[in-house]
Amino acid sequence: MKKIAVLSILMLILGVVATAFPGFRSEMDGEILELRLQIQIANAINAANLSPEQLGQVYDLAKSTRDELEALKERVTNTLEETLEKAISGEEATFPEMDSTRTRMQSIVENYLNGLKSIITVEQAENLSEYFRERALANRSEVYEKNAPIRERIEERLPEIEKQMRQQFRNLPPEAQERLKNLDVDERMRVMKEKMTDRLNASKPGIVERPVQNKFTTQSLAMVLLSDEALEVMEKMLGQ
């Protein structure tokens, strides 16, 4: 009884805090999302099985690339701010040419990706690809299990839906029924029912072979490594 009372008080306090300080929950959710992302990054780095020397090289490359991109962003920002000041002062201001900036950004990213390829071996890249493939399969399985109650309800309702459609057919005017008979409604309903069943079965892992897609791929990991969260993870791994 005492435990229940304490739990109720805690829930009440959390509710009051969330109501009185709405930003608190957003900040807390942001911290949780950041930690989840860092766990994903750390797991992916572990899956690659990098040596300490390789991890240090990846960190240095990502840090220098990030610095280059930040410097490029600062130059663009300064140029746009100067253009804005001209417009505010009454001068005719045109947007600065951005082709050279895009070319420079592409060059920075290409050099970064090529640098990663020179650090990570083919076997390690294959380890990463296998890791992401397995994660995608695991995620699909988790989603399938999570949606099991919904699929069961749909399957249970299929006979009822068929019955309702037949009842609606009988309530139609005779001329409409005649036109639908010529369309072989029974056959159409059978095909529709089979399609619905096939879709339900197709969502089961292992039943239908489909290419597995995972948003968190090797290339996306390379871009994620430029983030503050990834740099922090690598610093911790390197003991910095």
Image (cartoon, helix red, strand yellow):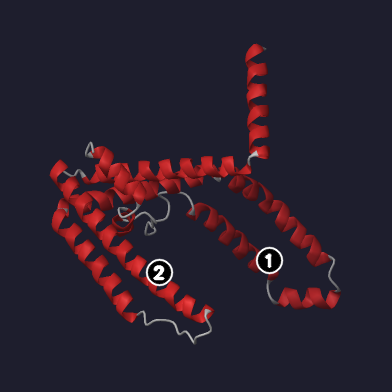
Disc 2 crowd rating (10 Å Cα; few below 14, some 14-19, many 20+) is: few
Q: Which residue is mark 1?
A: 186
Amino acid, disc 1? Asp
Disc 1 crowd rating (10 Å Cα; few below 14, some 14-19, many 20+) is: few
Query: What secondary structure is found at the residue carrying circle 1?
Result: helix
Mark closest to the chain's N terminus, 1 or 2: 2
Q: Is residue 126 above or below residue 110?
A: above
Question: Dividing the picture into quarters, in which one does residue 7 lie?
Answer: top right
9 or 166: which is nearer to us?
9
Specify the label residue 7 is tagged with: none
Q: Where does the image place residue 175, in percent across and percent down from the top left?
A: 83, 78
Q: Which residue is depicted at the point 75% across and 56% down?
A: 163
Q: Is residue 199 above or below residue 24?
A: below
Question: Dividing the picture into quarters, in which one does residue 8 lie?
Answer: top right
Q: Separation of disc 1 and disc 2 at Cα?
A: 65 Å
Specify the label residue 77 is tagged with: 2
Q: Where does the image place residue 89, in percent across and percent down from the top left?
A: 52, 80
- Which corner quadrant holds the N terminus? top right
Q: Is residue 131 above or below residue 3?
A: below
171 or 147: which is nearer to us?
147
Comparing labels 1 and 2, the label whose residue is closer to the camera: 2
- Which corner quadrant holds the C terminus? top left
For residue 151, side relative to residue 175 (left or right) = left
For residue 12, side relative to residue 109 (left or right) = right
Q: Which residue is depicted at the point 71% across and 57% down?
A: 162
For residue 147, side relative to residue 178 (left or right) = left
Amino acid, disc 2? Thr
Q: Is residue 130 above or below residue 115?
A: above
